[in-house]
Image (cartoon, rainbow, N blue to C red):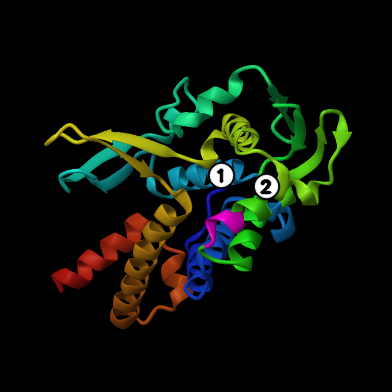
């Protein structure tokens, strides 16, 4: 992960102000992988993209994420720290509950070409990418059933029913729910960062609340706060010293803070 300069971060933030969720996620991924072109980034599986965003967040803002969630039973406000390393260091603490099931028999593949066999069906498919999710969201926002059908048709590579080939375009209307669940489980096991769901026990009532952690939204919120604070620093220093924005951004954070303290003392 390359360290990104303040000017580049501000440029990404400025571009993201008028972008939607998927546009901002792509901009953040571009910051994380500056040598990759947009088409390449859109072809990256969602979990691998999010792993890049977790790594970018570590470089920019540190290792631990502060997560806030409301208890689903008593509405108690809860705050806790989450370490993304839990996703890869022997734990499934941050995964959806269905991820573990995909390691059982009947599913296989290397993550890029997965195969599920269930109830006479054999389906080969690839992991959903950032481009897939963006295309599905753009087609019919808010229609979960339609979204799942479109995603299935986009990600399926080949299918057979009792040994007879079935066109992938026909799968949304033919494939049983049980087979689709097995496909989702296999994808979750192969790409665990794609669905980070935390089970949080409420200290007040003990109720377990499931909280989804969307790293793209979380990181954008942090970048937005950082950018607005940085622009305020630029304004104060430009007013006090007459320096240009590039000159101020070229200062190290420590030197910039020192000059701001001098302005306050004066």
Q: Which mark is residue 259?
A: none
Q: Going 39% across and 65% down the picture, which residue do you hit?
A: 224
Label 1, on which residue? 52
- The answer to whether the residue labelled 1 contacts the one labelled 2, judged by CB atoms less than 8 Å apart, is yes
Q: Which image quarter: residue 179?
A: top right
Total count of labels = 2
In front here: 185 or 163?
A: 163
Mark 1 burial class by Cα count in 10 Å: few <14, some 14-19, many 20+:
many
Quadrant of image for the C terminus: bottom left
Q: CA distance from mark 1 to mark 2?
A: 10 Å
Mark 2 burial class by Cα count in 10 Å: few <14, some 14-19, many 20+:
some
Q: Could you tell me residue 72's position as x and y percent?
A: 24, 45
Query: Magenta segment range?
Result: 143-147
Label 2, on which residue? 44
Q: Which image quarter: residue 1?
A: top right
Q: Could you tell me residue 213's position as x and y percent?
A: 40, 45
């Amino acid at each position: 992960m390359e360290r990104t300069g303040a000017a580049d971060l501000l440029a990404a933030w400025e571009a993201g102000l008028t972008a939607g969720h998927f546009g901002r996620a792509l901009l953040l991924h571009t910051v994380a992988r500056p040598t990759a072109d947009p088409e390449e980034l859109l072809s990256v599986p969602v979990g691998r993209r999010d792993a890049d965003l977790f790594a970018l967040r570590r470089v920019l803002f540190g290792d631990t994420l502060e997560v806030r969630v409301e208890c689903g039973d008593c509405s108690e406000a809860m705050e806790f720290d989450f370490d993304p390393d839990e996703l890869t260091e022997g734990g499934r603490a941050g995964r959806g509950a269905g991820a573990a099931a995909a390691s059982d028999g009947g599913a296989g593949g290397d993550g890029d070409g997965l195969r599920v066999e269930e109830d006479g069906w054999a389906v080969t498919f690839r992991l959903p990418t950032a481009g897939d999710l963006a295309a599905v969201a753009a087609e019919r926002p808010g229609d979960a059933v339609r979204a799942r059908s479109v995603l299935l048709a986009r990600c399926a590579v080949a299918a057979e029913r009792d040994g007879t080939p079935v066109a992938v375009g026909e799968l949304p209307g033919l494939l049983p729910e049980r087979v689709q669940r097995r496909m989702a489980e296999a994808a979750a096991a192969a790409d665990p960062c794609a669905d980070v769901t935390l089970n949080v026990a409420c200290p007040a009532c003990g109720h377990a609340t499931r909280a989804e952690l969307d790293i793209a939204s979380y990181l954008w919120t942090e970048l937005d706060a950082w950018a607005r604070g940085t622009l305020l620093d630029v304004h104060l220093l430009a007013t006090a010293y007459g320096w240009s924005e590039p000159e101020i951004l070229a200062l190290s954070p420590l030197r910039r803070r020192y000059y701001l303290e001098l302005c306050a003392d004066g």
